[in-house]
Image (cartoon, rainbow, N blue to C red):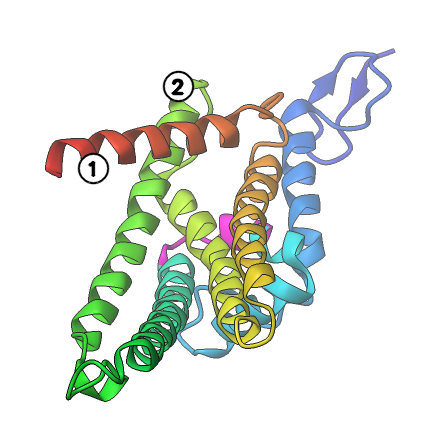
Amino acid sequence: MAKYCMMCGTPIEETGLKWCESCLSQREQAAAYEPYADSKRPLSDDSLQPYLDLAKDAFRRPSEAMERAARSPGALPGLAMAVAGSLVAALAALLYIRRVVSGIGYLFGNLMGGLTDEPLYPGNFTLPYGSIFFKLLLLLLLQWVILSLVLTGTARLFKLSITPVQSLNIVGTSKLYFAAGSLATFLLSFVFPVASMAVVLAAVLAGYLAIDRAVRSLLRTSGDVFYLVPATVALYYVGTVIVWKILF
């Protein structure tokens, strides 16, 4: 006895399923969006609130937030998160550099105080902190774009489909973890400097794990994607080293 799809009426084989392949695919896509039904407003909204919600959910419900960012139709979520994360990370790095320079100045000031008329105190010399901040910000934003392009290119090498927009959103949102880690590192350096470096490493790892989680949800029907993110990270760092060697 012939069976028919319960949604569109297309004849289907005796496979035990109630839907044809097309309708089943649509049901799977709809199910993928169900966890985000309570996510306030869509990320394509012109208001600021959806992006604030995404930033908060990145820490409260990271898996859901990364999946939502990956499925956003435009690149604005990734841009917003990348800019915000880069600003915080650059500021934290600048404050950390300033603190280190001040510490070195006081150290040499105490050592050389009796030998020079003008000991090396922080007030005796300054660094171009404004220039350093903007260079750090530019490097962080450039890293966002390059890593996104490498992710898209590596996916194609594995015969997988990740668009540049999806990569920009995934990598951009993951920068929130590095920003939080950079800020925590600066604050912890006042109490336990050695442990503060471990926080940076943990933040970098969290960012790559977030990218992996988003990629897995995006390509859940494309087979095993275990090697995609490790290969992306490896190619990114190898490319960075090569460019550094050429330029410097």
Q: Residues within 10 Å of mark 2 (few under 14, many from 20)?
A: few
Report the mark closest to the observer, 2 or 1. 1
- Picture layout, residue 239 above or below residue 218: above
Mark 2 and mark 1 residues within 8 Å of each other at the beta carbon = no
Q: What residue type is labelled 2?
A: Leu
Number of numbered tags placed on the structure image? 2
Q: Residues within 10 Å of mark 1 (few under 14, many from 20)?
A: few
Can residue 246 be seen from the camera position used here? yes
Q: Distance between the residues labelled 2 and 1?
A: 24 Å
Q: Please report the residue visible at 44 percent of the width from the left and 34 percent of the height from the top.
A: 233
The residue pinned by badge 1 equals 244
Q: Please report the residue visible at 51 percent of the width from the left and 32 percent of the height from the top.
A: 229
Can residue 161 be seen from the camera position used here? no
Q: Give the range drawn in magenta.
A: 67-75
Question: Is residue 245 a member of the stretch shown in magenta?
Answer: no
Quick one: SS at disc 2? helix
The image quarter in which residue 17 lies: top right
Left or right side of 155 for 196: right
Q: Quadrant of the N terminus?
A: top right
Q: Please report the residue visible at 50 percent of the width from the left and 78 percent of the height from the top.
A: 49
**x then y, percent, for residue 46:** 39, 74
Quick one: SS at disc 1? helix
**x then y, percent, for residue 218:** 56, 38
The residue pinned by badge 2 equals 157
